[in-house]
Image (spheres, grey):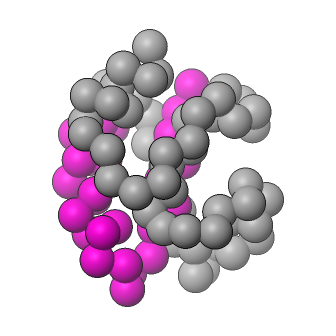
Amino acid sequence: MKYLYFSAAWCHPCSTLAPIMAQVGQSVSVQKIDVDSQSALASQYNVRNVPTVILVNGSTEVKRFVGIQSKETYINAAR
């Protein structure tokens, strides 16, 4: 499983979440996706707000988080 972390350079909450996702990335794979440059992927996963973090198994969505959660929330969800 891995996390798809949808963010944007202009998004202030995304900058707050970035260091948390860096810490999560030490335990679970995290792929950061810029919604402006990768809009097709954002559309594929129906991302309407940033930050959005989606836990996927292959290409199947397992869990979705919109907004900022704690590091522990992300790590526990991936177990």
Relative image position of residue 34 (x, y in whole percent): 52, 71
Q: Residue at x 55, y 68 (%)?
A: 49
Asked which quadrant contains residue 44, the reply is bottom right
Relative image position of residue 50 (x, y in whole percent): 48, 67
Which quarter shows the N terminus? Answer: top right
Residue 26 in view here = no
Q: Residue at x 75, y 33 (%)?
A: 60
Which quarter shows the C terminus? Answer: top left
Horizontal side, residue 31 vs residue 15: left or right: right
Residue 54 in view here = yes
Relative image position of residue 12 (x, y in whole percent): 28, 77
Relative image position of residue 8 (x, y in whole percent): 44, 76
Magenta segment includes 41? no
User: Which residues are the magenta region?
Assistant: 1-25
Position of residue 49 relative to residue 78, above or below, is below
Position of residue 15 relative to residue 9, above or below, is above
Magenta segment includes 13? yes
Q: Residue at x 64, y 29 (%)?
A: 62
Give the residue furthest to the top. 79
Position of residue 36 relative to residue 23, above or below, is below
Horizontal side, residue 47 vs residue 2: left or right: right
Q: Residue at x 44, y 34 (%)?
A: 29
Asked which quadrant contains residue 47, the reply is bottom right
Residue 65 or residue 8, whichever sits in front? 65
Count numbered badges in the picture.
0
Horizontal side, residue 1 vs residue 44: left or right: left
